[in-house]
Image: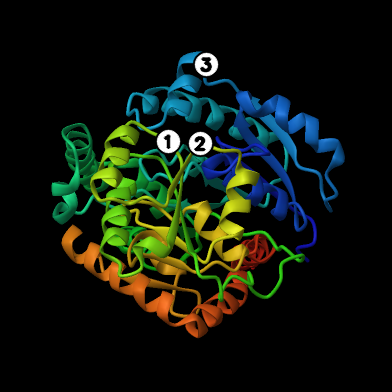
Amino acid sequence: MFNQKKILINAYACGPHWGSEIGMGWNWVINLSNYCELTVITEKGFQSEIEKVLPSLKLKYIPKFYYIDIGDKGRFLFWKQGSYTFYKHYKIWQKNAYVLAKQLVADNKYDIVHQLNMIGYREPGYLWKIEDTTYIIGPIGGYEQFPISFLSMLNMRDLIFALARNLINYTQRNFLTRPKKAYSRSNHIIAATPTGLKHIMKYKSNNIEIITETGAYKLSDLKENNDLTESTTFTITWVGKLHGAKALPLALKAISKSKYKNQIEFNIIGDGPNLKKYQKMASDLKLSNIIWHGKMANFKVKDIISNSQLFFFTSILEATSTVIFEALERNVPVLCHNTCGFGHVIDETCGIKIPLINPKKSIEQFSQEIDKIIEDRRRLNLLQKGCRSKIESYFWGNKASKMNEIYNKCLS
């Protein structure tokens, strides 16, 4: 009955060869195209990349794309990230997408319209206004606040940004009306994180569930483990932008307190405004076995993760993060906080997570867990094996199958 469902998707960020929101949009579209006939509205900046790869795609149904131009200024602000002035341009883009979508719905018989991304709740678009259609929204995120107990670890620039974000986020998540209207109108809602689920359920309590916004790839050429458990050097890798919310200082201080700090090789991948500050901190802590890789091509990042025994993820404000899946895909256990989307993914079978209390507690507990795992290589081996079974439910193909089931449920 549902073999040839026709779905209209709004995905502002959607393009091959990228991670984050762009890769998220692309992977949902490509994998859903094995189940449904998709028409996708996306930003014109991704057109050339999409049209280069479309002829080579081996899918059951090749998606059709329509492009709307956000303009040079809006596109610049999108790539800059972190600028709230972007939303002025993004709102206009969503209005134009609504006009196009309304025309497409009038000309074609779509079974479902789906507001896919970007995942932030602040701008839900306008597809919910199209009458007599089955409407789905999500994954939705962005509800998390910067924890007050961690503000003390920020420099002045990051502190001002975190406080401003918290204030704006509190105001918007309580008083913005369009998200509430979209939730009320929806036939089904996908939340990206447990925090998002909690807030959305204030306005809609049924037909809502958690599906992480990003996913994993099936890597068939990996061994069961990395064959690194007997190495005298213990390799830990950290990846992220060098700013406050990623909380690299927690990792530096935790490793400096480890009994085995001289045996630990610590890879730091990424750059950002706090690079020199963090390098000085590492020097003051007398951490000599650090490799500062800077920003790298994604395939190189994955190679370094593959040759690690532990992936250290200190972030305190995030959705799920693609790099978590990149570690699990390579059988590398994750050490992280029990918060946000990644706290929902990681469990005792594939990693170690500690409560998000305050910086002092995090440093102490991270350091203790590093020492425990270095001393218990059997446990490390079990965690490596557990990564593979954990990641299976997050494979893009399996996630698309689950979304297809939701489509079918909505149409039943």
Residue to which mark 2 is pinned: 295
Q: Is residue 137 visible?
A: no
Q: Is residue 188 visible?
A: yes
Q: What residue appears at the point 36 percent right and 70 percent down from the top-left corner? A: 370
Q: How is the image coloured?
A: rainbow
Residue to which mark 3 is pinned: 71
Side (left or right) of 35 relative to 85: right
Please name which of the two marks, 3 or 2, marks the residue nearer to the observer.
Answer: 2
404 shown above or below 152:
below
Amino acid found under the numbered disc labelled 2? Lys
Q: What's the distance in space between the residues labelled 1 and 2, CA to CA?
A: 6 Å
Give the number of marks. Answer: 3
Q: Say whether marks 1 and 2 touch (CB < 8 Å).
A: yes
Disc 1 residue crowd, few under 14, some 14–19, many 20+, Cα 10 Å: some
Residue 81 falls in which quadrant of the image? top left
Q: What's the distance in space between the residues labelled 3 and 2, CA to CA?
A: 27 Å
Residue to which mark 1 is pinned: 271
| Front residue of this view, candidates 83 and 335 | 335
